[in-house]
Amino acid sequence: MAASMNPTDDGVFSGINVTPLVDIILVLLIVFMVTAKLIVSNTLPMDLPKAATGSEQQVVFVVSLGADGATKVDTKDVESDDSVLGLARTARTQHPDVRAVIHADGSVPHRRVVRVMDLLKQGGIGKIAFGVDPVAAEAAAAGN
């Protein structure tokens, strides 16, 4: 809406120019849309369970890392951690939706666990979990 100037108005604008307000609101809208897309794309990928009466069983690839340096894959001793890569590739070709569970002793170095995780990922197994022993809630609270 344009301002009106009458000689009787003594030079005072009596209208509001809304064009700059609309421009600012449109720019803010675009900024919010762009940032919303960035926020959504940085979320963690979720593998939500599917519920149906299917007969497929979940295949689990279990890697056990002992405190003495022993490595087991599905309860079978293997030579070293590097053997996990070939076994993971084989399991992935046989079962495309295979998941891995790492059971590591509490005294196993962190770098060894990360190395096994990396070998599993190189073998094509991206769904990895850690096995734990459950403790009572009272014991967990006392340990803190």
Image: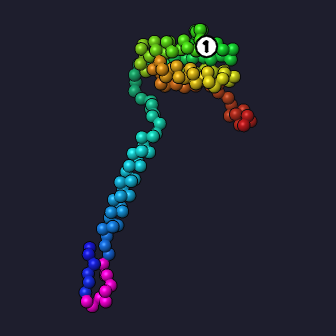
> How many discs mark residues in the rendered view?
1
Residue in view at x 25 percent, y 87 percent: 6
View extreme (front): residue: 11
Tell me the quadrant of the picture where the N terminus can be found. bottom left
View extreme (bottom): residue: 8
Residue in view at x 47 percent, y 24 percent: 126
Assess whether residue 44 is covered by the magenta stretch.
Answer: no
Is residue 113 or residue 61 the one in the foreground? 113
The quarter of the displayed image where residue 117 is located: top right
Work out whether 30 lies above or below 109: below
Tell me the quadrant of the picture where the C terminus can be found. top right
Residue 59 visible in image: no
Q: Position of residue 22 (x, y in %)?
A: 32, 64
Which residue in the protein does label 1 denote? 71
User: Overall secondary structure of the magenta stretch?
Assistant: loop
The quarter of the displayed image where residue 64 is located: top right
Q: Position of residue 77 (x, y in %)?
A: 60, 9
Q: Position of residue 11 (x, y in %)?
A: 31, 86
Residue in view at x 31 percent, y 73 percent: 17
Query: In the visual, does 11 lie left or right of 123?
Result: left
Element assignment for label 1: strand
Instruction: Report the colour scheme.
Output: rainbow
Query: In the visual, does 57 lie left or right of 10?
Result: right
View extreme (right): residue: 142
Amino acid type at circle 1 is Thr
Q: Position of residue 38 (x, y in %)?
A: 42, 44
Point out the stretch of residues depicted in magenta.
7-15
Is residue 140 or residue 92 the one in the foreground? 92
Residue 141 visible in image: yes
Assess whether residue 10 is covered by the magenta stretch.
Answer: yes
Query: Quick one: label 1, few (<14), some, or many (20+) residues within 10 Å?
Result: many
